[in-house]
Image (tube, helix red, strand yellow):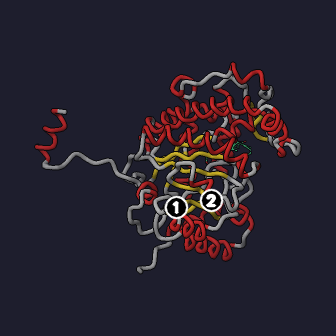
Amino acid sequence: MLNVEADYHQNQMPPKAPLKPLLVRAFSGEPIERPPVWLMRQAGRYMHEYQAVRQKTDFMTLCKTPALAAEVSMQPILAFGMDAVIVFSDILPPAEAMGLALTFGDKGPCFPNALLPDQVASLRIPEPEADLGFMLETLKILRRELSSPEHQDRALIGFAGAPWTLATYMIEGAIASEKGRHLHKTKAWLYNRPSVLHALLEKLALTIGRYLIAQIHAGAQAVQLFDTWAGHLSAREYAEFALPYQRRVISAVRQAHPEIPVIMYARGMRGCLPLLTQSGATVLSLDEFSDLSESRSALDANGFADLALQGNLDPVALWQADPERLTELTKQTLASGGSRRYGFNLGHGVLQYTPRDHVARVVDTAQAFRWQAP
Ligand code: CP3
């Protein structure tokens, strides 16, 4: 305290206010000259730099080695210059920390002993620092790295899976298989044992709320909640099994850190904007099946003008569209996002076989975009 005051008088300079990066300014409704640009799953197998690290390390070891996870988080920034860094990890380690063994193979993630109804009671509520400290450590490394002048306008984003989506992975064991895609085991719980499913979702909501708050303490300046399998529920089921638990997580985070943007991504929600607005998030990340400008108008007309939007270029367009067409689609997306409270992104994650020059083209096009003076 005394030292700060002494410095202040010596230098005649106010103490340095922490800089709000472009993404945070945009989502808070401050005037910005262009939208922030980042891509879900911007780090990963489409990058040779990532492949080089993965040749030496399996996926879980990579997630659990903070220096490597931080390196991989920065790879897309160094290659393409996005405006935000999403910490490298996965949505499933918290489920492992609850007591369910997790493996990652060629076919994606797998819980070899899928969760059974009578095991829900024995799942633990993890302590983020003790049980998921590797992710928090990665955030701390990235926080330091991003405080250099060259990076300080880039936001650091933390994330977690939403309770419904985490429950589906834990109950199915593996979703990569054709059978798993129906979520038939999870739906058996939903139809036949709803109270056990609620008990699991309750534990997940508590776990994820604490985890996101710990990520903010470790340096995250925004957090995103992924409800990737939301679209497998009817509106009525979503209101019972997905929404209340999103709300619980988000209200815990908002209560502890009202200044932090909370981004809600629920996939496959075509036409269900009113349900999305009820999550309590400050930013809605739309998938490629939604229309940004229609959503903006509907939000403005219904008292949700303060909600920001993120999205929503089709990741398959990023992969398959010819270069000229891709530029056009990127500009169309930016134009439909509107001139305030909007961040450019994809409708889902970057796909594995995406050519990297497509990513470079989209990021460059989006960052060169400027709002026309009114
Ligand atoms: O966005 C980023 O760059 C950060 C990293 C990130 C990963 N997974 C790395 C990853 C994030 C944000 C996730 C989230 C995630 N993981 C979700 C929600 C978002 C979405 O895509 O819907 C889900 C459902 C998962 C579960 C998961 N992890 C699957 C289905 C797979 C296998 C299929 C696939 O796309 O690779 C993973 C593995 C995974 N997670 C990889 C990466 C880079 C590939 C692992 C490898 O190197 O072999």
Q: Secondary structure at mark 2?
A: helix
What residue sits 34% from the left and 51% below the top? 19
In the rendered structure, find residue 295 and report the number of the disc placed on it: none
Residue 150, quarter of the rendered image: bottom left
What residue sits 65% from the left and 41% below the top? 53
Question: Disc count in the image?
Answer: 2
Q: Disc 1 versus disc 2: distance between alpha carbons?
A: 18 Å
Residue 33, position as x, y percentages in the image:
41, 69
Residue 79, quarter of the rendered image: bottom right
In the rendered structure, find residue 273 and report the number of the disc placed on it: 2
Q: Name the quarter where the N terminus is drawn.
A: top left
Nearer-the-camera pick, 313 or 264: 264
Residue 176, position as x, y percentages in the image:
82, 43
Residue 91, position as x, y percentages in the image:
64, 39
Q: Is residue 121 left or right of residue 15?
A: right
Ligand 1 within 8 Å of disc 1? The answer is no
Taking the image in four quarters, ligand 1 sits in the one at: top right
Q: Name the quarter where the C terminus is drawn.
A: bottom left
Q: Residue furthest top?
A: 122
Residue 131, quarter of the rendered image: top right
Residue 94, position as x, y percentages in the image:
63, 31
What residue sits 66% from the left and 58% below the top? 272
What amino acid is labelled 1 in the image?
A: Gly
What amino acid is labelled 2 in the image?
A: Leu
Q: Secondary structure at mark 1?
A: strand
Crowding at label 1, few (<14), some or many (≥20) Cα neighbours within 10 Å? Answer: many
Question: Mark 1 highlights which residue?
Answer: 343
What residue sits 75% from the left and 51% below the top? 234
